[in-house]
Amino acid sequence: MSSHKSANLTISNRGDNMTGTGTQADPYICETWEELTSVSTAKTVYIQMAESLIFDFNEIQPRGFDSRVNLSGQIDFNGCIFRNFYSTAVQAVYVISGSSWENLTFDNFLHEVSSSSSSQNVGFLCTDSGSSALQISNCKFYGKVNYGIYSTKNAIVFYSWNYNILQFEQCGFNVECACTSGIFSFFKMDFVKDCNIKLKVVSATANIVQSHSSSNVQKVYNCLITGKITVTDTSSNILCGAALSGYNVFKIETNAPLNYAGNGISVFDSDLSPDTTGGENFAGCTTTQLKNAEYLYSVGFPCYW
């Protein structure tokens, strides 16, 4: 088989040219989707993708996945792009805790779940209930989720079974979300750090971050969170987080009260949100102040001018 290492090469599910033994010193070098899924089944496996590959799932799985895809291990995707990834599984992508991802882009993904009788959460990316963290760094998620009627739990785009498992750092999100019934949340995990998050949500009720319990504090800090949330139940607050901390800027347009429930220093664009309330470190500001580093520094952000 010819080499697939040229930049921006679109590939499909073909061939077996994998090298390496899967150790840290000698990771598997994968060039195809088939090779990747054949080895990404354990958190202890080390994998590196060939550089700058584009996986177009219109070629690999044009009708989409109806069961969850496992992508576990210590994976350096090396600038890889997953384009047109489509799933109708209750949980689209599943990762064993203790794994790590870096340098991956989901471009134009679509996750659709019309209904579910399962007791499991509905979500795009999920991890198990193990004790070690799943770390995702320098990854981007661009796409759309459509969630319908589900049974006993929630619809959550990115979530972990335990509060201390899923961790995002230096990642980008631009996701359009629609949810017919029940509670919708964008995140349910341990921490989100240094991320740029843009979302558009239409749902009955909505949380940006959902806490596992009152004793488990989600850590969302050094993040810019922008977008629009429209809910049908305008009598309930839209939660910026059941428990946030750190330094964040929120620029969210809503049609219901936006409630900040965190303990850290967060700034809201008060021109957009109809109501913002929160703890003693809460700070509301104008659009002009959001762009003023000196002002942000004065209210506690680690900004310099």
Image (cartoon, rainbow, N blue to C red):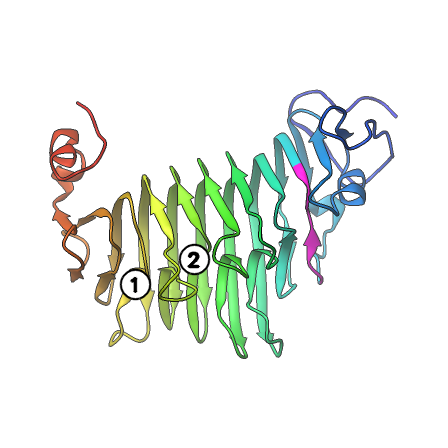
| Relative depth, front residue between 200 and 219 | 219
Q: Residues within 10 Å of mark 2 (few under 14, many from 20)?
A: many
Q: Can you say whether 203 is above or below 58 in the image?
A: below
Mark 1 is on which residue type?
Leu
Q: Position of residue 301 (x, y in %)?
A: 21, 36
Type of amino acid under label 2: Phe
Q: Residue at x 57, y 34 (%)?
A: 102
Q: Mark 2 = which residue?
A: 186
How far apart are the two marked residues, 1 and 2, measured between alpha carbons? 11 Å
The span picked out in magenta is: 67-74
Which secondary structure, mark 1?
A: strand
Instruction: From this view, report whether residue 105 is shown above or below residue 209.
Output: above
Relative side of 128 to 67, left or right: left
Rendered-image quadrant of the N terminus: top right
Q: Is residue 27 toward the left or the right of residue 2 in the image? A: left
**Residue 69: image location, x then y, percent:** 70, 53
Residue visible at 74% across and 50% down in the picture = 61
Q: In the drawing, what numbered circle is on residue 239?
A: 1
Q: Main secondary structure of the magenta part?
A: loop
Pick the front one: 169 or 268? 169
Q: Judge the density around disc 1: few (<14), some (14-19), many (≥20) Cα neighbours within 10 Å.
A: many
106 lies left or right of 25: left
Position of 110 with respect to 222 (left or right) is right
Q: Is residue 184 above or below residue 52?
A: below
In the picture, which quadrant includes the C terminus?
Answer: top left
Location of residue 204 by image quarter:
bottom left
Residue 73 part of the magenta segment: yes
Q: Which comes before the other along the chain, label 1 or label 2?
A: 2
Taking the spot 54% from the left edge, 76% from the top edge, the residue there is: 150
Q: Quadrant of residue 129?
A: bottom right
